[in-house]
Amino acid sequence: MNTLEKKKLAEMPKIELHLHIEGSLEPEMLLSLAEKNQISLPYNDVDAVRAAYRFRDLQSFLNLYYLATQCLKTEQDFYALTLAYLRHCRDENIVYTEMFFDPQTHLEHGVPLAVSMAGIAAAQGEAEREWGVDSALILCFERDRPAEGTIALLKDAEKIGGIIGVGLDSAERNHPPAKFAATFAAARALGLHRVAHAGEEGPPEYILEALDKLGVERIDHGVRALESPELVERLRAEQIPLTVCPFSNVALGGFGNLQQHNVARLLESGLKVTINSDDPAYFGGYLTANISDTWDALGLSFEQTIQVQKNAIDGCFAQAHKKREMYEKLSVYG
Ligand SMILES: [Zn+2]
């Protein structure tokens, strides 16, 4: 990307569809929350935390991720965390974002659902009022936990209000999606959207299973789809959006570096690719950096930047009139 294109990328309205709010917990905030909530961490300073934010694979990341989430205790903590991410959105011209959260982890840490959701909702309201940053919330179930109790949790969240859909995240290997079929059917019956992480570390079969057994409307990651030509054909024919997260894939060892990432091939295969940051505090950057560095590494065109933004508008769960507005704002850039 040349300087002018980078400037246009920074200025253009952008959308993010794969972001775990807990994964936006920066080391500075982690340490201050740990001190405030009197939780002892095995790190003395920001440098030690940053050093720990180097991972071998998904599991080594998740181990630290769950340790860090113990420091989120009060409504104010969730508010501060969410507002900090939405401030990033303001600064990067991310006009709309669909955020994931992991309530099972917080419940295990003694944080009631109403507490985490109230903090997140307060920040969402403020970001929209103050900065015009629009956002939505997706409740994720953790696939390496039992499915028991997830329908009750879903109903509790529905009563509180404020979620637009459900997702499936956490350790993928040996945790195929089908276990959550009843939970996703319940979500569908409640009129909620459905997405699932699949084909990140898991095989292409998990993507198929998420589509067929969970009825998902988007696949989070999905980079291993390329291993199955039949699956690629189906994803292309049905234009199923893939929320690809390049920095995350490299940080967790899915690809050796950005030059080896398969996002260019996914795009060339006619798949509905979007670019996202996943857990930006842990993986080295937010949305704009993910796009800019990946485009530079792979020599992708500026038109393809516009294409992934259009894909994100098509693939997001915003109302039709909001999508039209996003398209209009984007049209200035190409
Ligand atoms: Zn993710």
Image: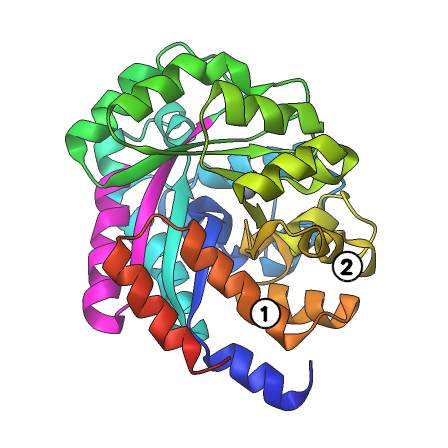
Going 54% across and 50% down the picture, which residue do you hit?
Answer: 279
Inspect the magenta stretch and tell me whether residue 119 lies in it.
Answer: yes
Please state the extent of the stretch shown in magenta in the rendering: 116-141
Mark 2 falls on what kind of element?
helix
Taking depth in this image into account, of 191 and 48 the one nearest to the observer is 191
Going 44% across and 50% down the picture, which residue do you hit?
Answer: 315
Taking depth in this image into account, of 197 and 31 the one nearest to the observer is 197
* Residue 305: assigned label: 1
Inspect the magenta stretch and tell me whether residue 175 lies in it.
Answer: no
Q: Residue 52: horizontal and vertical position, in percent?
A: 67, 48
Mark 1 falls on what kind of element?
helix
**Residue lying furthest bottom in this view?**
4
Amino acid found under the numbered disc labelled 2: Leu
Q: How many marks?
A: 2
- Give the quarter of the image for residue 109: top left
Magenta span dominant secondary structure: helix
Q: Is residue 160 above or below residue 49?
A: above
Q: Residue 18: horizontal and vertical position, in percent?
A: 49, 48
Q: Residue 242: horizontal and vertical position, in percent?
A: 56, 45
Q: Earlier in the sequence, mark 1 or mark 2?
A: 2
Please name the residue that numbered disc 2 is placed on.
258
**Other residues around mark 1 within 10 Å, as few (<14) / some (14–19) / many (≥20):** some
